[in-house]
Image (tube, rainbow, N blue to C red):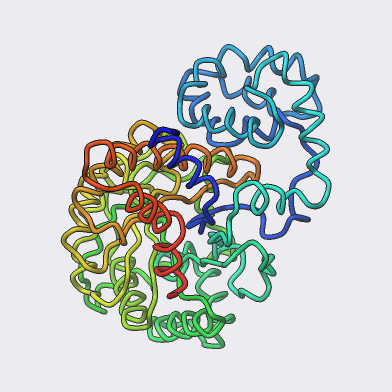
Amino acid sequence: MPSVLTDLQEHISGLPVLDTHEHLPVREDARNRNTDFLASYAQTYLNNDLLSAGMPSAAFFRVTDSQGGLGERWALAEPWWEKCRWTGYGRALDRTVQALYGQERIDGPSLPALDASFKASLAPGHFRRVLKDTCRIEASLLDIIAQDELDPAAIAADPEFFALVPRIDILVAPGNAGEILRVGRYAGVKAESFGGWLEAVHAALDLWRRAGLRVFKTALAYQRPLRYARAGRAGGGPGFAALMRAGGAPGGAPPPPVPGALGPPLPPPSETGSAFEDYMMHHVLGWLDGRDAVLQVHTGLQAGNGNLLANSDPLLLANLFLAYPRLKFDLFHASYPFWREAGALAKNFPNVYLDMCWTHTLSPAASVRILDEWLDTVPWNKISAFGGDYGFIDAVAGHLALARENVAKTLALRVEDGTASLPEAKKVAEALFYGNPRGLFFGV
């Protein structure tokens, strides 16, 4: 007879999945093909651990230069890679090559075969192989950074794989006057005055909603605290006027970070938010409230190396949960390391939900503890088990392998201690990976 854990693992491996969060290219033909295995795999979240371990930035950029010799670059990477192999980021990559390329681990002996297999995977059809054939993902919610494109039709994401999630951040915290005017042009409203800007924001949201979008995202915890105080219109006007006086072309402000990517340094995060941003967040959420919308909120650890972690404490959001009870808030990344706080909020507020996207790669061991405690605390219909949160297609498979394993381990504990029967545990697994996110994000 198979063990409870083995039975659950086999059951979960065959389940369909709704992937709550990705940063993947919107179409397969938009993939970077001027690369190789080592450059692509090192530029996943693992780069954060490599640099945290002490790898010099200059060495990292040599490792990720696909024009250099593969063996020479691996020799430079290997001492640091080995120090990171046990982290969730490192383990996810080893699980990826097991799932996709039949290799046990990433190391010197396996590297030539992995590079050849990876280059062969750059041919058309790899997205389907990873997302459908290997992962059984029905749909992935794709984070679209609105600073890049406002019109959902212009994004032209592949509907076979993706449902779009625009960020509201350009409406709450536009970087300059150019972005304000661009939103106005998209919305068909003159935005030169504060009143015009407020009208343009509502018109833009209405266009997104009429395009069928009902899930939105904010990642402003990368740059300011999540506490948005109630600010009167008089408090927001001066901030708008200052942005307009400062001018600036569209795109002049640095875009929000794409997790796992290295780029130019972002401005240092602030320990306070502006009255303008506070007012605009309430203005946007007031529109969303009552329109059958969901807001995905980045909480917990920020991607990259160095930030103000206290900015992303989910407890800072409680006034928004109270003010907008009809809007559903999906707390990302298990709010790690504030996962107990997130669980308490979801227990207390009917409109707060918990999302384990990214979490299984942050810490597989913590993910088991988090889910186990949440199942003691929170109704299980409020938890989503998986979102890949990668900008690199291959790594989705490795992350999902960790997620399936972690959920099976957690539910097996429930069966073995008599809290649940095996059929009940299987039912909960189906909800965590599919039924719960399907109901929350697609309303079915």
User: Where is 154 relative to 389, above or below?
Assistant: below
Residue at (22%, 55%) from the top-left corner?
A: 378
Residue at (52%, 88%) from the top-left corner?
A: 189
In which quadrant of the rendered image does the N terminus lie? top left
* 291 and 428: which is toward the camera: 428
Give percent across and percent down for residue 289. 31, 79
Furthest-front residue in this view: 1
In which quadrant of the rendered image does the C terminus lie? bottom left
* 390 and 433: which is toward the camera: 433
User: Where is 261 relative to 438, above or below?
Assistant: above
Give percent across and percent down for residue 435. 43, 63
Q: In screen coordinates, is 253 left or right of 419?
A: right
Q: Residue 71's image quarter?
A: top right
Q: In screen coordinates, is 382 left or right of 266?
A: left
Give percent across and percent down for residue 360. 43, 39
Residue at (52%, 48%) from the top-left corner?
A: 388
